[in-house]
Amino acid sequence: MRPMKASDPAASGPYRLLAELGSGGMGRVLLGAAPDGRLVAVKHVHAALAVDEGFRARFRREVAASRKVSGAYTAAVMDSDADAPTPWLASVFVAGPSLGAAVAAVGPLPEPLLRRLAAGLASALAEIHRVGLVHRDLKPDNVLLAEDGVRVIDFGIARAAWTGAEDEGEPGLTRTGLVIGSPAFMSPEQAEGERLTAAGDVFSLGSVLVLAATGRSPFVGSSTLRTLYDVVHAEPDLSGVPTGLRGIVERCLAKDPAARPSPAELLELLGPVAPTGRQWPPAVHRMIAAQRADIDRLLDGPEDKAGEAAPTPPDVKDAEDVKDVQDAEAAEDEPGPAEGPRTRVEPAPPRRVPRRKGAVVACVLAAAALGGTAYGLSPAGTTGGGSSATGGQDSPSDRYLRLPTCDDLAVQLPLQPRDKGGDSHSVAAGEARTACTWLGAADGGARSARVRWDLLDYSGSRNATTVQRESFRAQAADGVRASRLGFGDEAFRGAADTTTVCSLSVRDGNLIVRVDLGSGEFPAVFCEASATDIARAALTAVPH
């Protein structure tokens, strides 16, 4: 996603333009905002097409047909203007990577996910064909993996750029250097410039499934001409396609259009798809989260530097409210009594007091009275209540800490198998630290991840949570505050160095977790979302 330049248009019709999402053969796609605040994807047509009045007429007609397609498996068309200096089309914005980007990042999909993908694509084509449209450019980049399933985009619009007369049967593939369609995913009849039907989309669907199953197209030549020749004459390379799907894919890739199944027949061949809560591999959901985080940053502006005073929120109404909060925060810094049972107490949100402030302040004071410590273990392996020797509260000399080992922690984190050579664990003077490292090589490129837990359970006369808070904010001086994580008390993102792509530190009471991610398995496009998922799991993995 690229911010808009000063020379870029500020709006298309009623839609305010915010950033560039990408570009392709027909134009570029921009992120926009509708008057009601909804996000939209706005496609701007290339100038080479815009000067053609025949194109504008076809564009107008195709968009009108596209608006009849429901949005269950597509990005529904909302608005357009074929008469604008730069013709544009607005559709519902769908958060999610393209299938091509997802496969490049996480590798081929397993058979259950391939079946889900095939069913979604077949359902999308059935709806597109229902209104009399043919997609003409179904390819991995036009398939989005949304959180709740598949979305097919750019349906029908390729017809507007089609060379030739008004008669749909007029052959032709290009116009002045512009190729309409993607050679590796074209049907034989499209490669030969023949009349296109819905069966051509089914052929493209078969090629897309092969890419999803193997990471490559079934027709990969040394040049565009060789690829087109193979599409027309060669048998597809289906090695790597799961046996349970190979027969279905073969039927989709039949050279004879009449031998291919219709989308409805394809759904029957696939059979029922098992329901599931999460549609895709965790890495794909991290890519979705990363895209949303980028959009949040774009809409919200730069985040405040960690350690700077936050502005008084709108629900703190008067000086009395502010004083209540300040008094409660000061109470946290006072020495608390020896700790009793280890019950986790969630702190009240900082600097935020609702109108019923008395109850909230009471909760903050209660947390201070318990010492504010959320994590740690007492002597003899108990979880609070004093040592068996004293029969009462723990004294400083009695206390000790124990964090789980890397072997116990690692299985609870969304990370690949690790190299234990970088693990470390230490306990001293009321402090414990465990660090676990993941190292390896994938396709010749290094990947790495390191997660560190720092736990403070006793700090002389001072509250351990208060000490950790001060330590955390000192560490955060050069970072950027991370907001909207949904867990922990505070967080900051550190600047990447030569060994990391991104870094995230989160404090939850008296426990600090730091996640450092390297390259390879965690490319920058979804590194921050990955670090967030790992940090959440890292906090959950520690008993409290």
Image: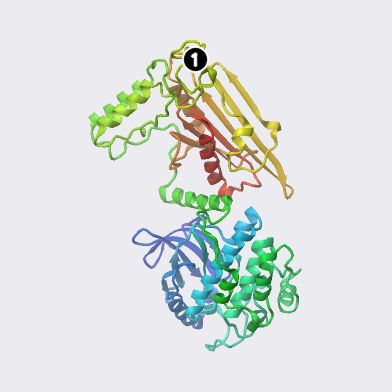
Residue positioned 67% across, 65% down in the render: 244
Q: Residue at x 27, y 27 (%)?
A: 324
Whether residue 46 can be seen here: no
Instruction: In the rendered view, tell whether residue 317 sits above or below residue 221.
Output: above
Q: Quadrant of residue 34?
A: bottom left
Q: Position of residue 125 (x, y in %)?
A: 53, 73
Classify mark 1: residues with Cα within 10 Å, few (<14), some (14-19) or many (20+): some
Q: Is residue 349 left or right of residue 118?
A: left
User: Which residue is pictured at 66% across the width and 47% down the height?
Assistant: 520
The answer to whether 212 appears left or right of 126 in the picture is: right
Q: Secondary structure at mark 1?
A: loop
Disc 1 marks which amino acid? Ser
101, above or below 456, in the image: below
| Occupied quadrant, residue 234 | bottom right
- Residue corresponding to mark 1: 387
Rendered position, 463 above or below 54: above
300 or 364, which lies in front? 364
Residue at image point 58% right, 70% down:
25
Q: Quadrant of residue 190?
A: bottom right
Q: How is the image coloured?
A: rainbow
